[in-house]
Image (cartoon, rainbow, N blue to C red):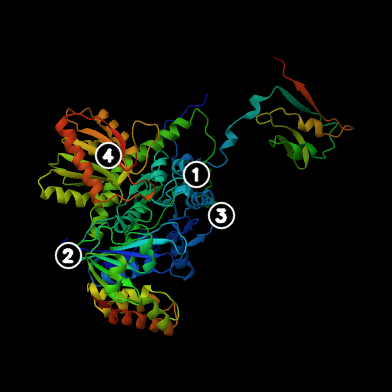
Amino acid sequence: MARLAALTGNNAAAEAIRQIKPDVFAAYPITPQTELAEEVAQFVADGILDTEYIPVESEHSSMSVCIGASLAGARAMTATASCGLAYMWELLPTTASLRSPVVMVVVNRAFNAPLNIHCSHDDSMGARDSGWVQLYSENAQEMYDNLIQAVKIAEDETIRLPVMVCMDGFIISHAVERLLLLEDEKVKNFLGEFKPVHSLLEVNNPVTIGACALPDYYTEHKKQHSEALRRSLDKIMEVANEYAKISGRSYSLFESYQLADAEYGIVIVNSAAGVTRTVVDKLRKEGVKAGLLKIRVYRPFPAAQIVQALKNLKVVAVLERTDSFGGVGSPVFTDISAAFMEAQTKEKPLMVNYIYGLGGRDVGLKDIGKVYANLQVINQKGKIEKSFAYLQARE
Amino acid sequence: MRKLQGWKDIPIGTAIIEAGSSVKYLTGEWRNARPEHNKDKCTNCLLCWIYCPDGAIIVEDSQVTGINYDYCKGCGICAAECPPKVKAITMVKNQN
Amino acid sequence: MSDLIEIRWHSRGGQGAMVAVRTLARAVIKDNKYAQGLPEFGPERMGAPIKAYNRFSTQPFSLYCRIVNPHVVVLLDPSVAKIVDVTEGIYDDSKLLVNVCLPPQEVRERLKLKNGKIYTVDATRIAQETLGRPMPNTPMMGALIKLVPVISLEVLLNEVVGEFIGKCSPGIVEANLAAIKRGFEEVSEE
C-alpha cells in the first residue's frame, strides 16, 4: 500500500533519496536546499541509510566527488541551488560527457545580484546546454516521482547520462503538502542495482576515462553524447510508463491540460503551473477555451511533440521565471520558436514571451488571469504588438 | 597510417578500454638527434636508465644493452646524465 | 474546491509561525484531507514581520501562491498590525484570530475594523504558564482549530505527540499539549 505523507518538497526529495539508497551522497548546504542536505545526513547518522555521505567543502567538490564515485561504479547523488550550481558549472559538462549517471536535485533559486534566496529558474535554465537530462517538478509529489525515475533513466545502459531534477525554492521546497510514497521495496525493485559500463576500480580490466582528445576525436565524443541525449526521450517515456505501473501516477514529456481544443495556451515550468491550471478551470467554466502546457522534460527538448500540442492554438504565451538576457526570448520560448521553424507546420499560434516571478515574486490567480485576457486581446487584434515583456515589473 | 574511428565505434564516455595502449604509439619518430651507446665505455651505473623519461634504455641482467629507438624522443637527458669521466652516450644529429 | 479555507498568519520571525503552519498542515493531511503549510521567508532574521499560509480542503488543489483573500487571519503578534495591513484582502465574513489580552471589541476599535469577526486568545500568557517561554504558536494552533474545525483537537494533539516524541522529554510534550488545549478552550469571540 502506498503511504500517505505530509512533507515539504525538500522532505520529499530526501525521502526519495533514502529509498533510492545512493552509494555516495556528496553535498554542500545552500539555501533553499539546506533542509534536504541535512535530512539525508540525519538518515545516515541515524543508521537508516547506508550511504557514504561526503560533506564536501564546496559544490565544485561535490560534483567532482560524484563523478569519481560514479565512474568507480557507485550510484552517486547530490543536491544544490543557485550559486552552488554555478560553482559546480565546470563539472556539469564533464559529468555528462563522461556519461556519469549522477542524479542531482536542483532547488531553483535566483542568481545574484542583488542577493536573493527565492525562486527563479536562472540556475537550471542556465545549465540547459551542459548535456544533462533535465526534469521539472510542479510540487513535492512530482519531485519525489521524478527523482526516482531520474535514477532509472540515468543508469539505463543505453543512456548513461546525468539527470537534474528541479523544483521551486521555498514555494515547494519549504511548503508542507500531501503526497503518496511508494514502499521501500517497490523502489528498490524498480531501480535494481547500478552496473557501471567500465569501473575505475576493476583492477583486472583497467581503463582510462577522461583522457585528452584532440580535434581528430573530440567531435566524435560530442556527437556520441548528443545522440545519447536525443535518444533518451524514448527512454524517459518508457521509464514513465513503467513507473505508472508501480505508482498509479502517469507522467509524460509534458502535461497537456485542456489543450486539445484550446484557443489560448500558457506554457509554464514548475509550481506556477498549479496556479495556471486553477485559472484554466475557472476560464473553462466561463466558456473561454484556455489550456496549459507544463514542461516536465526540458532536456532533451520534446520539440516535435510540443509543436503537435500547440500548433492549433490561436495564441500562446510562454511564461518563464528567468530571462535569457539579450536573447530573442527566454529559454523555453526560444526552443519552441525553433521547434516550429524546424517542423514547418502550416498551422502555428501567435506566440508571446512573458517573464514572471523573478526572485520569488508571487504569481497568483490574478496575474495568470491577466495573461489569458491579454491573449484574447491579441487574438481579436490578430497581431502581436509586444512579443516580449516583464509581467510584473513596476514602471 | 592510423584509421580514425567513427562516433558509433568509440567506447562511451571517453573511455580508453585497452590498458597500456600507449605502447602502440611509437614516439621515436619525433627524434631529431639520437643517443648512441658505447658498451665498451659504459660502467653500467644505470643513471641513464633512472633518468630516461621514456623508459627507452634497454637493460638486461643489470647491463645496459642499448637504446629502444621506437620510443626514444632524443631529448639527450641520458647523455647529459652519463658521468663526464665515462661519456658512454653521445648524441648524434639526424642526417636530413 | 468550494470548501477550501485559506488562512494567513502574521507574525514575527522567531515566534514559530512556520512550525505552526507546517504542523497544522501535517495534522490535516494525516486526517486524510488536503492541506498546505507554506511559510513566507523574508529577510530571515528574528523579529522581522513575516507571513505564513495554510490551505485546508477536502479536495485536491494546486495553488502554489500566496493567499491574498484569506478566510482567516491569525495575528500571532498584534504589534505587527502597526506596520503591516493585516486585514488586507479579507472578506466581510473573514475571521481574525488575535493573540492579545484584550477583549474582541477593544481589538476591533484599535484595528479600526468594520467587517470580519474577531476572536482573541492570550496565547503568550498561556505559553508562559504552560511552556515557561513566550512561544505563542502552540496555543494559537489550538485556538485556530476551535474556529476552523477542519480537524478535531485530538488529531492535532496526536500530531504534536508524533512530532515531539523521541526529540523532547515527556514533560515538554505534556506542556505543549496543555498549551494547545488551553488555546482551544480560552478563545473569546465577539
Instruction: For mark 4, give the secondary structure.
Output: strand
Query: Looking at numbered disc 4 in the image, what kind of residue is underneath it?
Result: Val
Query: Looking at numbered disc 3 in the image, what kind of residue is underneath it?
Result: Glu
Query: Marks 4 and 3: same chain?
Result: yes
Distance from disc 4 to disc 2, alpha carbons, whole Å, reads 32 Å
Judge the density around disc 1: few (<14), some (14-19), many (≥20) Cα neighbours within 10 Å. many
Query: Looking at numbered disc 2 in the image, what kind of residue is underneath it?
Result: Asp
User: What label does residue C3 carry, if any?
Assistant: 2
Instruction: For mark 1, give the secondary structure.
Output: helix
Which x, y percent locates residue A294?
Answer: 26, 46
The chain letter for the residue carrying disc 4 is A
Which x, y percent locates residue B75?
Answer: 73, 29
Distance from disc 4 to disc 1, alpha carbons, whole Å, reads 30 Å
State the residue at coordinates (58%, 33%).
B24
Which x, y percent locates residue A25?
Answer: 47, 58
Query: Marks 4 and 2: same chain?
Result: no
Front of the two marks 4 and 3: 4
- Identify the residue position indicated by label 4 in the image: A318
Distance from disc 3 to disc 2, alpha carbons, whole Å, reads 49 Å
* C30 lies above or below A88: below
Which x, y percent locates residue A252?
Answer: 24, 48
State the residue at coordinates (54%, 56%).
A56
The chain letter for the residue carrying disc 3 is A
Rendered-image quadrant of the N terminus of chain C:
bottom left
Q: In the picture, residue A75 is in which quadrant? A: bottom left
State the residue at coordinates (54%, 39%).
A211
Instruction: For mark 3, give the secondary structure.
Output: loop
Distance from disc 4 to disc 3, alpha carbons, whole Å, reads 38 Å
Considering every residue shown, the one lying at the far left of the view is A287
The chain letter for the residue carrying disc 1 is A
